[in-house]
Amino acid sequence: MEIVVVGRHTEVLEKFRQHATDKLTKLAQLAPRAQRIDVVVTHERNPRQAGSSERVELTVVDKGPVIRAEACADDRYAALDLAIAKLQERLRRSRDRRKDHHNRTLTAANDAPVDVRPLSEDEEEPPAERPTAVAPGDVVEIALGDSPVVIREKVHSAHPMTVDDALYEMELVGHDFYLFIDAETAQPAVAYRRHGWSYGVVKLDTPVSTNGRVHEREDAAV
């Protein structure tokens, strides 16, 4: 597992790099499939924020969902320890959830009948979709006309998921919101954090596409 340590508006000494590497290497047992852990150290120069002037962000690059953690303190070593503690908890939750999902999948596979019939002509695989203008993972910045406004655009790969899965992945990255496609309705949706352990979900009622043409969604007659 590769560990990459970079500084943002600050210099990172080799002593801290080695300390972070030694600490994070021990997390391999919680994330055996992790390819890399990115460590970003940021220094806040505002003297009014001296108590949280050092920020450490940790991101685990894995084949599964992105797992992040960050923490602030007046010392970057203390911030690193706080961030690692958060990351450990999220990695444990991810590992336990994978185990539960694996067990449920095995049970369902053993119980469900297997359909080995060949595809009919009407069931052929649909043609591949055209590639988007921005590839997943790429970031582009576009100026808004002649104004000084710059729009930063990034495309993420996505697959339909339940609201429960969206809340779970939102907690793994430590964000206050999470954009996803609802598996039950196929609608774009955003899960967000409210007060305490309360959450909200906003969905978009998008037009329906039929035979290449887009039309407004109509309620079924009762």
Image (cartoon, rainbow, N blue to C red):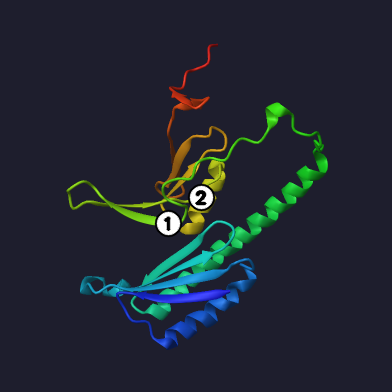
Q: Earlier in the sequence, mark 2 or mark 1?
A: 1
Q: Which of 210 and 60 is in front in this view?
A: 210
Does 5 sit above or below residue 219?
below
Q: Label 2: how many residues lie within 10 Å, few (<14), some (14-19) or many (20+)?
A: few
Give the left or right position of residue 123, taking residue 180 as reference.
right
- The residue indicated by pointer 2 is 157
Q: Do the residues labelled 2 and 1 touch (CB within 8 Å)?
A: no
Q: Which residue lies furthest to the bottom in this view?
A: 15
CA separation, marks 2 and 1? 11 Å
Mark whose residue sits in front, 2 or 1: 1
Q: In which quarter of the image is the C terminus?
A: top right
Which residue is at the front of the view, 77 or 157?
157
Residue at the spot 40% in from the left edge and 46% down from the top edge: 194
- At 22% from the left and 51% from the top, the residue drawn is 149
Amino acid type at image mark 2:
Ser
Q: What element carries label 1?
A: loop
Q: Which amino acid does label 1 sit on?
A: Asp
Residue 53: % across, % down: 30, 74
Seen at 69% across and 26% down, the residue is: 122
x 51%, y 75%: residue: 3
Q: Which of 174 and 74 is in front in this view?
A: 174
Toward which corner of the image does residue 73 lie, by quadrant? bottom left
Q: Is mark 2 on a helix, strand or loop?
A: loop
Check the picture and name the quadrant holding the N terminus.
bottom right
Instruction: Name the spot of residue 189 as percent of width and height, x first.
Output: 45, 39
Q: Alpha-carbon neighbours of circle 1 within 10 Å: few (<14), some, or many (≥20)?
A: few
Q: Dot 1 corresponds to which residue?
A: 138
Q: Where is residue 94 in the image (x, y as percent from the top left)?
A: 60, 59
Q: Is residue 110 above or below residue 119?
A: below
The numbered mark at residue 29 is none
> Would you say 42 lies left or right of 110 here?
left
